[in-house]
Image (cartoon, grey):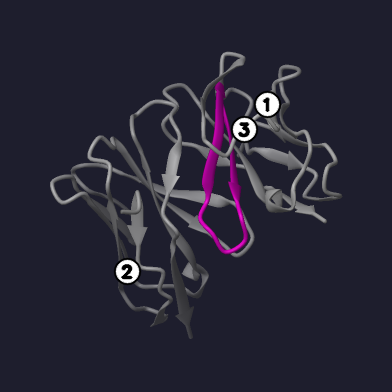
Amino acid sequence: RKEVEQDPGPFNVPEGATVAFNCTYSNSASQSFFWYRQDCRKEPKLLMSVYSSGNEDGRFTAQLNRASQYISLLIRDSKLSDSATYLCVVKADTGFQKLVFGTGTRLLVSP
Amino acid sequence: EPEVTQTPSHQVTQMGQEVILRCVPISNHLYFYWYRQILGQKVEFLVSFYNNEISEKSEIFDDQFSVERPDGSNFTLKIRSTKLEDSAMYFCASSGIGGNEQYFGPGTRLTVT
């Protein structure tokens, strides 16, 4: 089983749509969770950390379900500039340990 | 906004040659990392570095690889004898006190011919 599993997509949505991405992770000891965004041939950029209580940052909402080992990202009111690959990332501890990346879900927002 | 920088942006080298990839982490960060991404594949961890020593390394990080912090600002990755399969994007990252959130540099694209 992959450590972090994501639907590769692509998800094709019109501007203004709401889109949701899901991710599952295999290591039950994982303690920290993140969503990164990666544009083509660019570096991963931290979008948001994911907390147990769920958290929201503007149009973005992240949820964590530890029992099901499942993480989600919801994007409301999609913009053209949201087109990118969204990477689900986990870490075994809250310290300086390695990040484990999923393969990413590609989002294409069209006019 | 402080950021991680990397040089060069693109390096082309012949198989068997040594390459050094350079990174300047965010200035008050204490933890440093190298990751790589082969074209079309996921980002993979190579090594983490703290307090002037390696704290963790992956199976990819074999004897051909080494890291160094030669001064107070630079963090380098050396590949001693490059192979074709080393062709990838190499990302440096750093994190601050607590080490939880990691910030990535723009990457060095390494092409081995």
C-alpha span from label 3 to label 2: 44 Å
Disc 1 residue crowd, few under 14, some 14–19, many 20+, Cα 10 Å: many
- Which contiguous range is marked in magenta? B32-49
SS category of the residue bearing label 2: loop
Quadrant location of residue B98? top left
Which chain is indicated by disc 1? Answer: B
Q: Mark 2 belongs to which amino acid?
A: Arg
- How busy is the neighbourhood of tag 3: few (under 14 within 10 Å), some, or many (20 plus)? few
Can marks 2 and 1 be said to lie on one chain?
no
What secondary structure is found at the residue carrying circle 3?
loop
* Whether residue B13 can be seen here: yes
Q: Residue at x 50, y 75 (%)?
A: A80
Q: Is residue B2 inside the magenta stretch?
A: no
Residue A83, label in figure? none
Q: Quadrant of the N terminus of chain B?
A: top right
Real-space Cα distance between discs 1 and 3? 11 Å
For disc 3, the chain is B
Question: Mark 3 is on which residue type?
Answer: Asp
Name the mark on residue B67. 1
Residue A104: image quadrant is bottom left
Residue that mark 2 sits on:
A76
Please name the amino acid that badge 1 sits on.
Val
Same subunit under labels 3 and 2?
no
Q: Badge 2: how crowded within 10 Å, few (<14), some, or many (20+)?
A: some
